């Protein structure tokens, strides 16, 4: 309940923030669509983004399942290296912290994270490339 | 940049990561796939920067961080020996795990920057997701460090069995749940660090009882964990790229663990509970006098040059001895002499999935001469020579024939069906599973005792006579 | 632009409707989180649900691609029958129209749709079942 | 029921549909999969009812609608002959297409019920999605009706080529785009119905120039369309089940079309442009006198009873003659006599993918005796008899050998490699591609002219002597 309420607040506030930006464009017929609103909730406008994210997560697991099973066993080592590299996309969190965190401590943590995942990003993709470059067909 | 555009770009980056894995379905498309992966990462980074618009100073800091890390990573990638891949992957995992902890810490200390509330009023949902992410991340970190140390030989591969460790683990697990509930209630930073500490300890305790032989499964499992940690943080940050990637990596690690367990005919649970491997089981001393036929490099050269079909079976010993280049030379000589040469790879040969394939590729062996177990196993019956180099467990016939063997049921390469089986290893010792190999004592077997690389080089020399 | 604005209005109104329902629980510290709001937009709270739906759509196409290629050719006819059956999930639209449409005409259209897809739902699944029941292994 | 719970349930229903298709990867899991599909549909319906909470009267109407449609569907499903599957699928598609149009119409007349705005103020995005859905739905409807009529033989399979049809189609297409823009601007119901009308006409015009032989590709393509229409309406309704299902069905149809085009070695474009098939090409009359060896049922029985291996190649004629049961009886006789019997299925044998497999399954032929082209093609060389029953194009060697043949490059079953090739058909006429089959005149071929079922029954009788 608490979580739901917070999520709703959050949605509401976010909407408010964006509305501010497009205020000059806004000329919605306020209040007139009461019935419509309630009904719209029905069709998804008010759905907690968590549900969508969860759906995306579940579908991505399906995709992951199929895509990994289709990897040829000969390339399982590069697979381990490249999954390593792409899991460094957590860099987006580090960038946020270093880029805009008000707290110096947070920025510091972010910096540590940034350096570590950078090792992984460059190291991971390059070592994969190095490995893959070695796989050759029989020359005729 | 609008948030909608940014979300869309994060989605694109997630899709590119899918395509990166998809490329690995065949060597010819794999390089292209890796490129997609790099582009996806570039898009994710650029989008975040465009969205956050850091000040010039902060931007400098970011560039610095990327440069330091990127430099270290690039140099490592260039220098690392192909034989050290298992260690490298474990080390990289530990970095992702620690980074996840740091990102979560940053989010707790500056929730505004992540849009998850304000200090003292962070959304409960975000706190739950974050604690999951941080706990899994911390376990991944210490677990991977242990795996790295064991794989790199800096720590004994022997399982370290602490008394009552199951109880300790359960207590720690329960403590973690309690702490997470506390964190959601109080949002106390102290509790946060307690979660980190407990998870770090748990990571160590979970992995040390697992023997060195099972480390590849552990590495893969930790890979999976790091994926789930990323996905959890992806929920917190509402970032599609992270969620998709997390799911991909999570499935990948889980599937690879499964494939390895199947290849070893072990249950995943038995791997996790630990205690297997490392204890060098005494060679079965059943009183029966066993005779071993030993051969020289000259014998081997003669046998193979007069063969029509030779199947090479590489194993962990080839990796240790770095014998792949000499092996390739030997194969070239044979092919020049009209002998048909093929390579047979067992799914768990070596110390990680695909390990042998990478090493052979490094030595320029074309991938269309290299075959999986199912595709080549029936051909041993027609082969004149099976050249087993540094492999052991994956050829052990007791896995097929001896119901009492601990590896009974594990699929093996039927090298004993070949007319002659040449065995290159340094001793009559056992492999990683610690089980005596009855093949050594068979009639058709000739042992070539010595270092894999040296022996192969001597054979190559002998072929020139 | 017009579309975006409407979408935003829509999001806003939907939120308002739901808020009404949880008004008694709401005690958000209004206005205090200005910075937080702006930042939160960053992390996704204000994202148009369309983006999420699109992501789900794209991932589902990937899943569809893999799942269909993994169907054995011997079962391609049942595959056609069952995709037919599941595409009748459009019945949700028909149910909404028949169930709550204020306009009689709309309800009528909905009723026609409902009858048609019902044919499909029952016919599709049952004919698939009938076919699948015929596939047998060699008895030993 | 909260909207979040409902969305979650719709997701569950989408996942169950994925599992339904996944089950089809093997006959043993397929029944379970179909059950998942039914459960998914049940969840979607129950969730919608719980969300909408219709009044008692409306609820009664819903039950009535479900009962009428369900009754018709169930009876049809029970009664339909397996040979009529292609028609049935086409007919079912037309229903989905029409239902999509009706749902969109309902949404335009009562936008509040669908939460897409109020009358006169429907959200632009919803209007765009809806018009796409309605246009594709209407095209699917009339297109499927034409496909049904052609497949059911109620309309000639001959392509109907209207002069300047490409121009007309382009004009209609442009008109559709203009109308959609107009609809978004004015929200006029009149424009909406114009869109419907234009799409209905377009559906007819797109399909009538396509010959009967290509109808299976068309059916599959329309299947794909109906998926995309469902997905478009899924966006309008914000319904995850619809979006996921639409994507699944859309990909499925597209992939099946692709498989068929590859099986026929045709490009998808050439199929869509139409004009192929139906025109019975004059048998190649190159002046060379050709002799045909004709045989009787007794000859065939003798040959097969004395064979070691017989491969049966069924085609469209078997379906027409309903010969599958007689065929199974014949195979049983042969097996009882120690002859090895296998079935070889070409990917485009019959009139829809998997058509032959269903018919054989109906006649209780175990699926592990039935093989795909790639898996069995090399075995013809070792077979004593290839029993070709009602197949023609899929055995035509000119696809392999004659570069000037219109079907050159299409993969074929190498029945000419078998010692003897028995050909059951009613005449020396051509198959659906309208191309003379040079196999009839080869030495090893014996024609058994007659209806497939009758001829097979006679052979069975002759075997008893
Ligand atoms: N690949 C994976 O993913 C994976 C994952 C988990 C577990 N495992 C386990 O790892 C094992 C792999 O089997 P395997 O047959 O490849 O290896 P193995 O059974 O561990 O045998 C390797 C053999 O190589 C010999 N050797 C070591 N260094 C050598 C050198 N310098 N020159 C020549 N020989 C040398 C050793 O014998 P000497 O000491 O007599 O020389 C040893 O018997 C299996 O037990 C498998 O279950 C693999
Ligand atoms: N399966 C698919 O998905 C699909 C899709 C698109 C197109 N197609 C096309 O359909 C064709 C399928 O090839 P196919 O070899 O199965 O069929 P086919 O080439 O159309 O030949 C069928 C033969 O069956 C004979 N026949 C008809 N009724 C018969 C009866 N009652 N008893 C005995 N014989 C009878 C006909 O010869 P008589 O008239 O002399 O008896 C005819 O030559 C291909 O051209 C393919 O490209 C198939």
Image: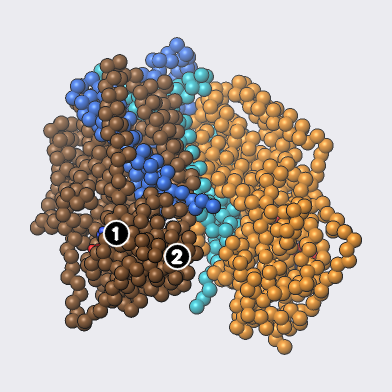
Chain colours: A blue, B brown, C cyan, D orange
Quadrant where the C terminus of chain B is found in the figure: bottom left
Q: Quadrant of residue C81?
A: bottom right
User: Quick check: which quadrant has ligand 1?
Assistant: bottom left
Instruction: Specify whether disc 1 shares its chain with disc 2.
Output: yes
Secondary element under disc 1, as helix, strand or loop, is helix
D105 lies above or below B446: above
Q: What is the C-alpha distance between the residues marked 1 and 2?
A: 27 Å
Residue at left offset 63%, top offset 39% = D137
Secondary element under disc 2, as helix, strand or loop, is helix
A33 lies above or below B427: above
Residue C65 at x, y percent in the picture: 52, 47
Residue for badge 1 = B454
Instruction: Kindly tell me whether mark 2's CB lies below 8 Å from ligand 1.
Output: no
Residue for badge 2 = B376
Of all chains, the one bearing label 2 is B
Q: Nearer the viewer, mark 1 or mark 2?
A: 1
Inspect this view and state whether residue B462 appears: yes
Residue at left offset 36%, top offset 64% = B462
Residue C60 at x, y percent in the picture: 48, 43
Q: In the figure, is residue D438 to the left or right of C6?
A: right
Residue B289 at x, y percent in the picture: 21, 81
Q: In the figure, is residue D231 to the left or right of B413?
A: right
Q: Quick one: which residue is furthest to the right in this view?
A: D287
Label 2: how many residues lie within 10 Å, few (<14), some (14-19) or many (20+)?
Answer: some
Quadrant where the N terminus of chain B is found in the figure: top left
**Most foreground residue, D29 or D441:** D441
Q: Quadrant of residue D292?
A: bottom right
Of all chains, the one bearing label 1 is B
Residue at left offset 61%, top offset 62% = D373
Residue A127 at x, y percent in the picture: 35, 41
> Between disc 1 and disc 2, whose residue precedes?
2
Inspect this view and state whether residue D37 appears: no
């Amino acid at each position: 309940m608490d979580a739901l309420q917070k999520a709703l607040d959050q949605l509401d506030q976010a909407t408010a923030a964006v509305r501010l930006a497009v205020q000059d464009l806004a000329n919605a017929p306020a209040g007139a669509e009461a019935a419509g609103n309630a009904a719209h909730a029905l069709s998804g406008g008010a759905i907690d983004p968590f549900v969508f994210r969860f759906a995306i997560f579940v579908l991505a697991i399906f995709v992951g399942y199929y895509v990994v099973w289709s990897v040829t066993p000969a390339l399982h080592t590069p697979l381990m290296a490249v999954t390593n590299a792409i899991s460094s996309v957590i860099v987006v969190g580090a960038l946020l912290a270093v880029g805009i965190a008000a707290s110096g401590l947070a920025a510091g943590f972010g910096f540590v994270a940034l350096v570590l995942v950078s090792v992984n990003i460059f190291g991971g993709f390059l070592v994969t490339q190095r490995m893959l470059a070695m796989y050759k067909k029989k020359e005729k | 940049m609008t948030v909608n555009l940014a979300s869309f770009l994060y989605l694109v980056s997630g899709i590119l990561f899918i395509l990166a894995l998809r490329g690995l379905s065949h060597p010819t498309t794999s390089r292209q796939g890796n490129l997609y992966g790099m582009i996806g990462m570039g898009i994710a980074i650029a989008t975040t920067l465009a969205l956050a618009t850091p000040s010039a100073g902060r931007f400098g800091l970011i560039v610095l961080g990327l440069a330091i890390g990127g430099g270290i990573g690039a140099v490592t990638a260039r220098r690392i020996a192909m034989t050290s891949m298992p260690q490298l992957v474990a080390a990289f995992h530990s970095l992702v795990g620690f980074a996840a902890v740091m990102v979560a810490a940053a989010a707790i200390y500056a929730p505004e920057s992540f849009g998850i509330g304000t200090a003292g009023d962070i959304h409960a949902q975000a706190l739950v997701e974050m604690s999951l992410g941080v706990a899994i991340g911390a376990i991944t970190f210490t677990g991977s460090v242990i795996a790295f140390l064991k794989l790199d030989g800096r720590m004994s591969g022997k399982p370290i069995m602490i008394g009552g460790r199951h109880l300790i683990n359960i207590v720690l697990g329960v403590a973690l749940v309690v702490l997470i509930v506390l964190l959601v209630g109080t949002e106390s930073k102290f509790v946060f660090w307690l979660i980190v500490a407990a998870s770090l300890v748990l990571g160590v305790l979970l992995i040390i009882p697992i023997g060195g032989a099972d480390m590849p499964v552990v590495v893969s499992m930790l890979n999976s964990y790091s994926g789930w940690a990323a996905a959890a943080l992806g929920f917190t940050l509402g970032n599609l790229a992270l969620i998709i990637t997390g799911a991909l990596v999570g499935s990948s690690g889980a599937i690879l663990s499964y494939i390895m367990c199947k290849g070893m005919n072990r249950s995943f649970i038995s791997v996790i509970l630990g205690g297997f491997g490392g204890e060098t089981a005494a060679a079965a001393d059943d009183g029966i006098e066993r005779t071993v036929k030993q051969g020289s490099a000259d014998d081997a050269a003669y046998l193979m040059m007069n063969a029509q079909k030779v199947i090479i079976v590489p194993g962990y010993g080839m990796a240790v001895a770095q014998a792949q280049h000499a092996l390739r030379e030997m194969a070239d000589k044979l092919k020049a002499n009209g002998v048909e040469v093929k390579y047979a790879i067992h799914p768990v040969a070596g110390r990680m999935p695909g390990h042998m394939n990478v090493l052979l590729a490094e030595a320029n062996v074309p991938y269309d001469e290299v075959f999986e177990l199912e595709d080549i196993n029936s051909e041993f019956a027609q082969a004149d020579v099976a050249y087993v180099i540094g492999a052991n467990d994956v050829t052990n016939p007791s896995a097929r024939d001896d119901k009492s063997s601990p590896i009974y049921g594990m699929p093996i390469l039927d090298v004993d069906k070949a007319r002659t089986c040449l065995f290159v290893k340094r001793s009559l010792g056992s492999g990683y599973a610690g089980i005596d190999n009855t093949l050594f004592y068979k009639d058709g077997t000739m042992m070539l005792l010595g270092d894999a690389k040296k022996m192969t080089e001597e054979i190559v020399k002998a072929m020139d006579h």
